[in-house]
Amino acid sequence: MKYIVALLGLLVVLGLSYIVSNNKKNIRFKPIAIMIVLQVVLAFVLLNTFAGATLIKGFSGVFEQLLSYAQEGINFVFGGILNEGQFSFFLSVLLPIVFISALIGILQYLKILPFIVKGIGYVLSKVNGMGKLESYNAVASAILGQSEVFISVKKQIGLLPKHRLYTLCASAMSTVSMSIVGSYMQILDPKYVVTALVLNLFGGFIIASILNPYTVEEGEDVLQVQEEGEKQTFFEMLSEYIMDGFKVAIIVAAMLIGFIALIGMINGLFLGTIGISFQQILGFIFAPFAFIMGVPWKDAVDAGSIMATKMVSNEFVAMLEISKYPNLSAKAVGVVSVFLVSFANFSSIGIIAGAVKGLHEKQGNVVARFGMKLLYGATLVSVLSATIAGIFI
């Protein structure tokens, strides 16, 4: 039965992508089929093999160790604020982003990250049938973040046609930055976080290849990366990345306070007037999508509510919502966890459009105009990744 549901989910995702495609005649099905097969193979390896479990354990172990180092700095500054045994989301989950951001800055400055990103991007370009720039951007987005990644390709932002700019922005919204991955792993099972990271990378290309198909000519397939740190000293760079990490932590904290409070108020208003919460209504709307992702029907409404919360607020708010549904089955929790690991929400439209506009005003306006299509595509990427993962959960 689960294979039939997964096939249905795959067909729905591909069908919804095809319906709004801007150039149906130019869709190349061979690379899409190859990438779907790769997703299935990778999901099986990560979720159902000893090698995958070992890889995930190693990956999460690295982040666990890094977070323990981050805690040393946090305890020095904020030690004594909490009573023993108490937990603070801001101190334990968000502030470690500062340390991870600093590490990313060091690896970027030493040219280690650009080398890795270009290498993986080159290999991906041979699989996905797209250009080197698109492949580089997808990998870089998963490391640098959805706004910072555009700085690394700012030399080419103003030269890109609308269709290529869409693919770059879609990749940025479909992935998550490495600086936040450790925070996700403190809320969700690391194996679902890692699986989502890998599947989303290919899922972004699959959906973009249907929604926005095009061919990059050989003369256009040039990658010009802006190397960060070339005009800065090491400590100038380090200070900048530390402050960037702190800004991210503060922004996420502010978003959580605002969105959780607003959702609580709206739920209260709906309960007081019609006897059902706003999130429950959204749950009924998203329940069919939860079901085709592999969530058991008895959990579909609750899972749909969490999925909708992510879209209207952000992934952190939705991740925290999972704990409010203790009766969710293990499969439902796993499938929804994979769905939540991306930046596909309304606020990301403004973040990405603002980042591009800061580098090139005209192109920023172009991004703002196709913002809803970006969210549509990125959400389908999350549904696709969760559907594939659901086969093996």
Image (cartoon, rainbow, N blue to C red):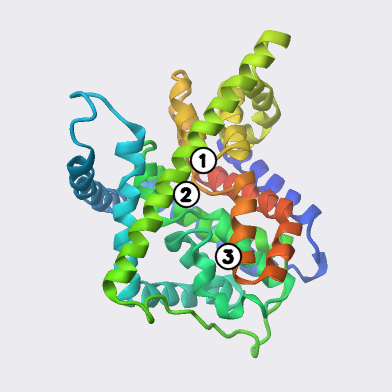
Mark 2: secondary structure: helix
Q: Amino acid at mark 3?
A: Ile
Q: CA distance from mark 1 to mark 2?
A: 13 Å
Q: Amino acid at mark 2?
A: Ala
Q: CA distance from mark 3 to mark 1?
A: 29 Å
Decide which of tag 3 and tag 1 comes sooner along the chain.
3
> In this figure, which residue is indicated by the disc labeled 3?
34
Kindly report which numbered mark, 2 or 3, lies closer to the viewer in this rendering: 2
**Is 354 or 103 nearer to us in this picture?**
354
- Which percent across, then down, holds residue 222? 58, 85
Q: Is residue 354 above or below residue 359?
A: above
**What is the quadrant of the C terminus in the image?**
top left
Which residue does the image show at 59% across and 26% down from the upper left?
Answer: 263
Is any part of residue 392 visible from this angle?
A: no
> In this figure, which residue is indicated by the disc labeled 1?
315
**What is the quadrant of the N terminus in the image?**
top right
